[in-house]
Each structure stands twice: as structure tokens, then as C-alpha cells.
Image (cartoon, grey):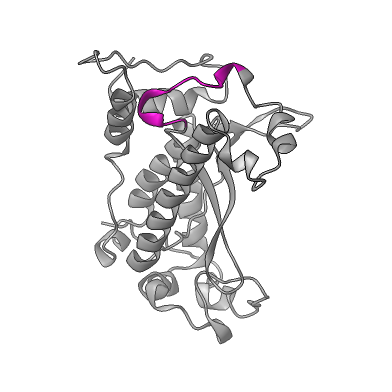
Amino acid sequence: MESPEPSNTGAAPHTYQELLSDYQLDASFDEMFRAEAEPRAPYRALYERLLRLSADALRNRQRAADLAFLNQGITFTVYGDDEGTERIFPYDLLPRIVTSDEWARIERGLAQRIRALNLFLKDIYHEGRILAEGVVPPSLVYSCKHYRREMRGLHVPRDIYVSVVGTDLIRLADGTFAVLEDNLRVPSGVSYMLANRQVMKRVFPHLFSSYGVRPIDHYGQLLLATLRALAPADKQDPTIVLLTPGVYNSAYFEHAFLARQMGIE
């Protein structure tokens, strides 16, 4: 059950509807609302739930979520910050809802994109047809500091150069999704997403009965299966370990979290 709302003996707290009274839509795509603050169909159940909450209740839930992250050590480093401090991972109390149809399109597009990226890497380290035909200027590739000449002609298992990808998606003004960038070398952040889901279940448990939310708890086992599939063919039960720089590094939470999810050292 969701926790009861706190009672207030002073002035009546603002309601969510009152907080939206001056809400302005700009040219960006608004996830929750259409024009004139009309909630989109996927967000209606969430919107109606929010209308029954006071601003104080929302703040209390936000504090509870922040405290859950703090107690679990879910922090990150702000690179370039003069203080160099660890901060609690920012958590938006309101979930972004991706419909089943939207996700099916995203999934197909990302799978196609990752296949294309692997084929591109295979080509530039072997035949180099995309360079010879001028589709991509050779100078653009050969001048890249991450291009490894020692990898030319080297075959990798199953021709998979990229096994884990962190793709950043954005919404365009018309609501369609676009790729902002592909993180291929050091993809990170999935553990925060998994932790977010756990906290969301505690903060808004009833919402999960209102929506048919797809599970994500099996991610660790999918990742483990992927890594094992890339092992040499003669290794029937390859040993998978996760290397981490140590408990005082900002990546340690994610490494430890994924190790637990996969059941590895």
C-alpha cells in the first residue's frame, strides 16, 4: 500500500493542480501534457493520482527517494566541478512513460543501429570499403585518437566489436525520438536505471498496478549471457569477472551492483 498522506495542522498545502496553474508549454515536446494542460492518454492515470496528492506529500516522497539513494551509496562525480564532490544521483519523482508501440519502434531502431555500428567497425579494420568509396573520409578515421592501427586485420569473436552500448535518446519537438550519441567505449548508467525502478516501486507502488510495466530485473542475466557468448568457442563455462577501481571511485556502485545482478566476482 502507498503510505497515507501526512496531516497538516497549519495552512492547507498546495495541491498539484494549483502548482500547475501557471504551467507554460514551450516549443519543446511535453511528455505529460498536450496543449492547454490536457494530459496525454498514457499519463492520465499518473495525472489523476497526482491530483490527489498535496505538494507536501510530493516533497515527502522526493525526500524518501533521495534518502534511499543516499543509503545505498548511489552517487556520481561531477567532472569539472572544482569541489569534485560526490552527489546523489538526480531522481525525477515523476516517471517518463514510454508506450509499448513507442518502445517497439525504439527497440527495432536501436538493434538496427548497433548492427550498423558493428559492421562499420569491422569494415574499417578489414576491407575498408566505406573508406575506399568515399562514404566516410579516410582522414576522419585515421586521425581519430581512438582508432587502433594494431587492430587492423584482427578478427574478434562473432565479429562483435560493440557488445554493450549506452545510447542517449532525446525527444524532438514533434515527439519523435532521435539519438544524441552512442556510448560504445565505456557505456555506463544502467545500474542507476535499475535502482530507479526499485525506488519507484516504493514511492508509487499503485502505479505499477495501473500500468502494464515491462520488467527489467532480468538485465543482469542478459548481460552475463552476452559476455559468455563472446568467450572463445572452446570455453564451455568461461569465468566472468568485473574489474573495478575500488570503493572510493564513483564507478564502484555501478560495478558492485552489476556484479551482484550477474552473480559474479
Does any portion of residue 168 appear in the rendered image? yes
| In this picture, residue 202 sits left or right of residue 249 | left
Q: Residue at x 38, y 60 (%)?
A: 103
Of 161 and 58, the residue lying toward us: 161
Q: Is residue 170 above or below residue 31?
A: above
Nearest the eye: 119 or 135: 135
- Judged left or right of residue 151, residue 26 is right
Estimate the x, y position of residue 120 in percent, counting from the top left.
53, 40
Considering only vertical position in the picture, is 219 above or below 200? above
Q: Please identify the residue farthest to the right as the structure is shown.
A: 82
Q: What stretch is highlighted in magenta?
A: 150-161
Q: Quadrant of the C terminus?
A: top left
Say if 25 sits above or below 36 in the image: above
* Residue 232, x across and y down, in percent: 31, 16
- The outermost residue toward the left is 236
**Residue nearest the observer in this picture, 238 or 31:** 238
Q: Quadrant of the N terminus?
A: bottom left
Q: Which residue occupies the foreground of this view, 233 or 51?
A: 233
Q: Position of residue 236 (x, y in %)?
A: 20, 16
Residue drawn 44% across the image and 74% down it: 51
Q: Which residue is drawn at 45% across and 15% down?
A: 243
Specify whether 46 is left or right of 252. Answer: left
Please provide percent x and percent y for residue 50: 43, 70
Count of numbered circles in the view: 0
Q: In this view, does 161 lie above or below 17?
A: above
- The residue under the point 40% across, 40% down is 195
Work out whether residue 48 can be spotted. no
